[in-house]
Image (cartoon, helix red, strand yellow):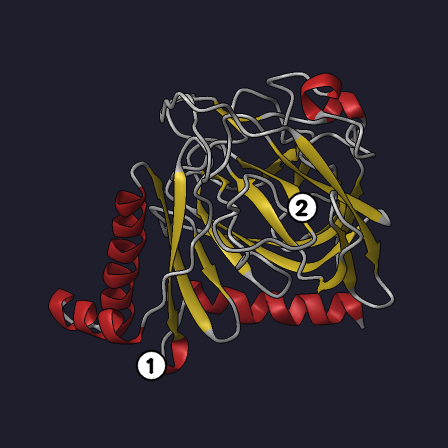
Amino acid sequence: MNVVSFRPKPEELSYTFGGRPPVAKVRPGTILELYTEDCFGGRVQTVDDLPSQVCEFPYLNPVTGPFHVEGAEPGDTLALHFVSITPARDWAVSTTFPHFGALTATHTTAMLHPPLEERVWRYDIDLERNVAVYHARNSDFTVDLPLDPMHGTVGVAPAANETRMSITPDAHGGNMDTPELRAGVTVYLGVNVEGGLFAIGDGHGLQGHGEVCGTAIESAMNTVVAVELIKGVATPWPRLEDDGHLMSTGSARPLEDAYRISQHDLVTWTSELTGLDTLDAYQLVSQAGQAPVGNVCDTNYTMVAKLPKAHLGKIAVYEDAHARLRALASAYTS
C-alpha cells in the first residue's frame, strides 16, 4: 500500500482550480493523508475576529493541492474515496456576512434595506462526544449538534487552461458544498488536463442543506483519501457514490438550472447503466429520486440528484471503483 502524507505550508495553499503546478505526483491506488485549512485560513479564531478585518480577498477558501495523478489524461475519470474526515481542532467558526447568504441582499440582488450584520459564532468541537456545541451570541442558549464532517470543496483543473476561484462550483467540481460528500463516499471527477490536478478543502463539521447563511461550521480537517483512475471513461459533471446511492451534481444560476443539470445527468446515467431508454429512466428517477440541495449562496448554486442503487438491479458503476476503494480503505484502517 502506497501512503503519502501532505500538510501544506501556508504558502502552498491554493485558492484556484487550474493555474498552479502540482504540489506532488501520486499513483493510482495511493492513500493520501491530508491536512486542509478552514475557509478562513485559520484566521477567524474568536467571535471578535471579523473576516472583513482579518482575511484578505481573494485569499479565502484555500484548498490543499493540486495533486497530479500519474497516467490521468483528458477523457479519463478520477475516483476519490473519502476514507475519513476528522476535525483537526477543538473549535470551529461560522459567520454571517453583509451581502452574502440566501436571506440577504447581494451584489446581484440589490435592495435598499441595510445589509446583514457581520457576526461570528465559535463552536466547541468535542470528538469524544461527536458534537459541535452551538452558543447563541445574544442569549445563554446552547445546544449540542451531532458532527457530520464533510468537504465543501473538491475538484480538478478546468478545461482549456481556465483558472477558477476555489469558491466557484462548476463542471470541474469546486465549492459544491453538498453535505453528501462525507466519509465513505466516492466522488468521480472528469479529467480535463494531464494529471487531473485535484485539490480538496473547505471542511465542515456540520452543514445544513443549502448552507443558507453562507457558511457552515467551518473546520480544519485531517482527511484521508484513496485515489483511483478510470481510463477512457468521461464524466460530464461531478458524481458521487456511497454504499446505497448514486448521485449527480449540477452547478449553475439560477437554481432551477442547477437542478435540471443534476437531474439530467442522473437520468442519462441511469439509462446508460441499466439499458433503459431515456423516458423509462426519466420515469424511474422522477418517482424514486431525491434532490438534496448543495449551496444556494456561492457564485453558482449546486443541486444534487440522488437515487438508491437498489432500484437499478445488478449494475457496474465505474468498473466497481467504489467497492475496490472501500476495500483499500478497509485495509488501510485495519
Q: Which residue is mark 1?
A: 311
Q: Is residue 126 visible?
A: yes
Mark 2 nearby-residue class (10 Å; few <14, some 14–19, many ≥20) = many
Q: Which residue is mark 2?
A: 203
Mark 1 or mark 2, which is nearer to you?
A: 2
Residue 48 rendering spot, x and y as whole percentages: 80, 28
The quarter of the picture where residue 41 lies is top right
Which residue is nearer to you in this view: 54 or 109? 109
- The amino acid marked with disc number 1 is His
| Helix, strand or loop at mark 1 | helix
Which residue is nearer to you in this view: 242 or 317? 242
Q: Is residue 220 visible?
A: no
The quarter of the picture where residue 330 lies is bottom right
Residue 166 rendering spot, x and y as whole percentages: 54, 30
Left or right of 282? Residue 93 is right
Residue 16 rendering spot, x and y as whole percentages: 56, 25
Left or right of 80? Residue 250 is left
Image quadrant occupied by the N terminus: bottom right
Which residue is nearer to you in this view: 71 or 80? 80
- The amino acid marked with disc number 2 is Gly
